[in-house]
Amino acid sequence: MFVLLAAGCAGREMRGEELLLPDVPEEKTKEDLDPVTEDAGGTGQATGHTGVQKPLIYVQVSGAVNEPGVYALPEGSRVFEAIELAGGVSKEADVQSLNQAKPLADGEMIRVLTAEEAAQAAEEENISAGQNQSQDDGRVNLNTATKEELMQLPGIGAAKAERILAWREENGGFAQIEDLMKIEGIKEGVFSKVEDCVRVQ
């Protein structure tokens, strides 16, 4: 009887030890074992758990920067990041004329202007805008006008408009508005009506 009781107690103790066994850890996922890494090339490319690198683009940075050259950046980079790779702008640079937030495209060239170059470019742009405005003053260009446009001029009907076109074709264009009086049917009377309405440039 004593032996049986002892054996029964031993059995209960073994079962009690089995209940105290530590929990088995869950198996780790691939994401836990393969964290996000950064490449060693210094280009700022990030790689995910699949290990696939983002596409690279190549841009040329020139002008008022400390280290001009061609640089590789991850797709989606901005102008300011390319300038940083080029050593930043020089002290002569005009950063006001540069959109540093603009997204970059593969094969693009970024030229950073100096303050002097930026001032010259602005002056040329103003001159060009003034020229375009002066040319678009409502006068008819004798060297480019169509028959319908010529017929809008005072004293010019269909027949005279056709003669103007024919003369322009034969003589390679009008050098001055006074050339109109070389056309049959257009004398001083008609010319005086249209001289303020036409131009040759």
Image (spheres, helix red, strand yellow):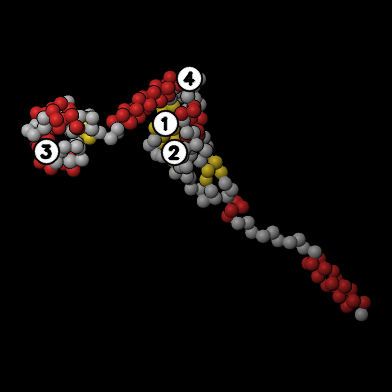
Read off the residue under disc 2.
Answer: 104
User: Disc 1 vs disc 3: which is toward the camera?
Assistant: 3
Mark 1 secondary-structure assignment: strand
Pointer 1 or 3: first along the chain: 1
Instruction: Choose top left, top right, bottom left or bottom right for residue 30.
Output: bottom right
Could you tell me the amino acid type at mark 3? Lys
Q: Which residue is mark 4?
A: 92
Q: Earlier in the sequence, mark 4 or mark 1?
A: 4
Q: Which is more N-terminal, label 3 or label 2?
A: 2
- In three-dimensional space, the C-alpha distance between marks 2 and 3, rounded to whole angstroms, equals 56 Å
What element does badge 2 sit on?
loop
Q: Is residue 116 left or right of residue 197?
A: right
In the image: residue 136, left or right of residue 26: left
Circle number at residue 160: 3
Q: Is residue 114 above or below residue 39?
A: above
Amino acid at the residue labelled 4: Glu
Residue sitting at 44 percent across and 27 percent down?
A: 112
Name the outermost residue toward the front.
189
Give the Cα separation between the discs numbered 2 and 1. 9 Å
| Relative vertical location of residue 120 with respect to residue 1 in this rendering, above or below | above
* Residue lying furthest bottom: 1
Q: CA distance from mark 3 to mark 4?
A: 60 Å
Residue 136 appears in the figure: yes
Amino acid beneath label 1: Ile
Q: Which residue is mark 1?
A: 110
Q: Give the x, y percent position of residue 165.
A: 12, 37
Task: Please state which of the two labelled residues, at mark 3 or mark 4, is closer to the viewer.
Answer: 3
Quarter occupied by the N terminus = bottom right
Q: Nearer the viewer, residue 1 or 173?
A: 173
Residue 1 as seen in the image, left or right of residue 170: right
Q: Mark 2 near mark 1, Cβ–Cβ under 8 Å?
A: yes
